[in-house]
Image (cartoon, rainbow, N blue to C red):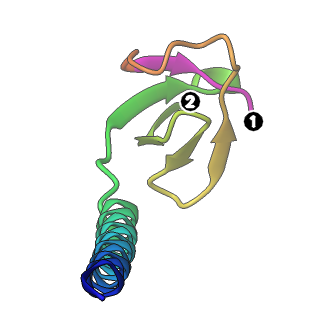
Amino acid sequence: MEDTRRDKQDVQRLMLIKETILNAEKQIQMAKSLIAQLESNYTPSKKTYGVAEGGKVVEGTFDGQIMIGMDGRQYPVPATMPANQNWLKVTC
């Protein structure tokens, strides 16, 4: 009789532990989602100056792939160009 009661308690404890873990996993996923949302809203801009064809100097923001000029146009940047350079040679 006591073994049956102990088994029931063990099963209840296991269920409680599993539920606790499941709730913790859900909270971690929610926290990760909130972090991702906040990170997507925060995009640090880096002012960059580029020299386009024809010698025109273009000021804009370089996102690691393209430069967006103050005029709103996108300027392609060669993949070999280091992202930390303040001066880029771009072609229009």
Name the residue at the right extreme. Answer: 92
Q: Nearer the viewer, residue 12 or 34?
A: 12
Q: Nearer the viewer, residue 61 or 49?
A: 61
**Element type at mark 1:** loop
Quadrant for residue 60, please give it: top left
Name the kind of residue labelled 2 in the image.
Lys
Horizontal arrangement in the rendering, residue 48 relative to residue 73 (left or right): left
**Element type at mark 2:** loop
Q: Position of residue 79 (x, y in %)?
A: 69, 19
Report the residue at 38% width, 80% height from top.
Answer: 11
Q: Which residue position is annotated with label 2? A: 56
Name the kind of residue labelled 1 in the image.
Cys
Question: Dots 2 and 1: beta carbons under 8 Å?
Answer: yes
Rendered image: mark on residue 92:
1
Q: In this rendering, is residue 38 above or below 19? A: above
Q: Position of residue 90 (x, y in %)?
A: 64, 25
Q: Nearer the viewer, residue 27 or 12?
A: 12
Q: Residues within 10 Å of mark 2 (few under 14, many from 20)?
A: few
Q: Nearer the viewer, residue 48 or 26?
A: 26
Q: Which residues are magenta?
A: 87-92
Q: Position of residue 17 (x, y in %)?
A: 29, 72
Q: Is residue 26 visible?
A: no
Horizontal arrangement in the rendering, residue 18 relative to residue 44 (left or right): right
Quick one: quadrant of the C terminus? Answer: top right
Q: In this rendering, is residue 1 above or below 14? A: below
Name the residue at the front extreme. Answer: 1
Q: Position of residue 86 (x, y in %)?
A: 36, 20
Report the residue at 41% width, 29% height from top.
Answer: 49
Report the residue at 31% width, 85% height from top.
Answer: 12
Q: Residues within 10 Å of mark 1 (few under 14, many from 20)?
A: few
